[in-house]
Amino acid sequence: MQTYDFIVVGSGSAGSVLAERLSASGRFSVLVLEAGGTDRRFYVQMPLGYGKTFFDPAVNWNYKAEPDLGLAGNVDHWPRGRLLGGSSSINAMVWIRGAREDFDAWAAAGNPGWGFDDLLPAFKALEDNQAGANQWRGVGGPLHITDCSRAVHPLTKRYLAAASQAGLPFNPDFNGASQEGVGIYQITTRNGRRMSAARAFLHPAMKRKNVRVEINALVTRILFEGKRAVGIEYLQNGETKTARAGREVILSGGSINSPQLLQLSGVGPSSLLGPLGIPVVHANENVGANLQDHVGINYTFKGRLPTLNQILRPWWGKLMVGMQYILMRSGPLSLSMNNAGGFFRTDPAAARPNMQLYFQAFSTVIPKSGERPILTPDPWPGFSIGLSNCRPSSRGEIMIRSSNPRDYPKIVANAYSTEADVAEMLAAVKFVRKIASMPAMADIIKEEVLPGPSITSDADLIEDFRKRSGTVYHPVSTCRMGPDAAQAVVDPRLRVHGLAGLRVVDASIFPDNITGNTNAASIMTGWKGAELVLEDQK
């Protein structure tokens, strides 16, 4: 059995950062275990290629949630990255940190060091923002962030104008002084290629002698001596292997895999583990509980002007943008599907935004089997205005079904399970229609395709968003952080309550969800987590 100072389970957004930061001094050895394979794939590196990875089992866990009454009984598809870089290798690349109030609330809940002013230096240190440095943005860090303001589709300007006519101000930087308003999204790319956490952090770390990365290594359980984690067991190429951690085992599997591994290892609700024949190492009812997620929906329109549909749909258009990308690393394939977006309040009396907007200069009403039809959009000019809730009050859970680590856990999202979530979404979809009715957009809209002009009453609008909504892939809080072991899984230093030598460092530790896409905060958690680990080494 080989021994390493640190074993990091998972090479995703946080795990990649941990590998780089913990190994940087050369003092410590680090083993990274990734259940998936390499990220050296064309459709992973090409930004808009994530339409091809959306269902690809070679790089995607392809989880399914349980049938959800809140979603009219639908079974939601939950893609999660199963490769180096984790979900940062297959996501939409939008770089949103979250609101100041989000992190200040974390600190106020008894988590010192997690307020916005505490975390801003970490965000700035890890960033290399093309827009330049200021009091909010960082440059020179490992992670390049692209300013897309000159590259977006011309229709994006109409969206921004219509939103302004509807009362939302233009916001030049959602990671600046405030989030409210509409603007162009910054994305994690560099020179037309995806800037995943693996590209920014893990691959540079892999050049060091004190870092070892094992791919296709499915971790099956944490090894304990009493209440101390001392190593892990994993499957690789049909063989069961073990590795020992001289200092700490760190779980960075994300909001699904981290609670799953804890439960498989005897850390979780005793009422769950006992009937499955798993000896309880440490009982904690919060492992896998408190699941939070953002839920979204698109309103889709048929336009009078050409959209990306007319470029991405025909063979000659595919050839043109393909050549543009291969030769110049530019064009639609170098961007995210979300050119622009924004944040707004469904209630003007609210203190801050509670809804996020997304603008897509193409439409995908007509499905294509086996892939998200980003690269094969509808045959007519179409575009979508999407939105998702920022801090929903609905809560779900992720619990194992058996003691077999290959069995996928049971994901119960409980979307729209509170009256407050339903009420704010109803107000939000009405506001999307308001944006579409403004002169800048109404002039070029031929018809509303989804949900369609016949859907007007509150009851019909609610029925529609229950039927058509789904996750926007931001699950958090299943190993939530907090000072009270009766209500949390990890303490403010990310140490698992009641156990030694074991931390969780990924989005599962978020005490509550954040206002916006979760990848930036996940990467920051890896950076902050590494600081905490290194501070605690003697």
Image (spheres, rainbow, N blue to C red):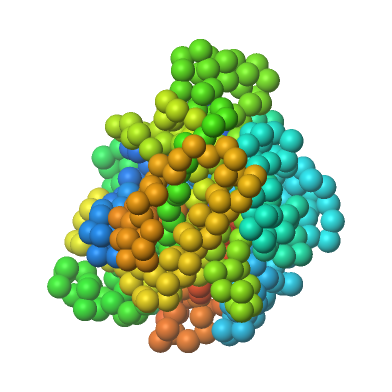
Which x, y percent locates residue 508? 46, 65
User: Which quadrant would the C terminus be assigned to in this image?
Assistant: bottom right
Vertical arrangement, residue 176 with respect to residue 305, above or below: below
Between 163 and 291, the residue placed more toward the observer is 163
Which x, y percent locates residue 283? 31, 80
Residue pictured at 66% horizontal, 26% vertical: 330
Which x, y percent locates residue 38? 46, 35
Q: Is residue 125 visible?
A: no
Q: Is residue 441 visible?
A: yes
Which x, y percent locates residue 56? 36, 35
Residue pictured at 50% horizontal, 70% vertical: 391
Report the label total.
0
User: In the visual, does 235 lie left or right of 52?
Assistant: left
Residue pictured at 30% horizontal, 55% vertical: 467
Which quadrant holds residue 118? Answer: bottom right
Which quadrant holds residue 535? Answer: bottom right
User: In the visual, does 314 lie left or right of 128?
Assistant: left
Vertical arrangement, residue 508 with respect to residue 31, above or below: below
Residue pictured at 44% horizontal, 79% vertical: 488
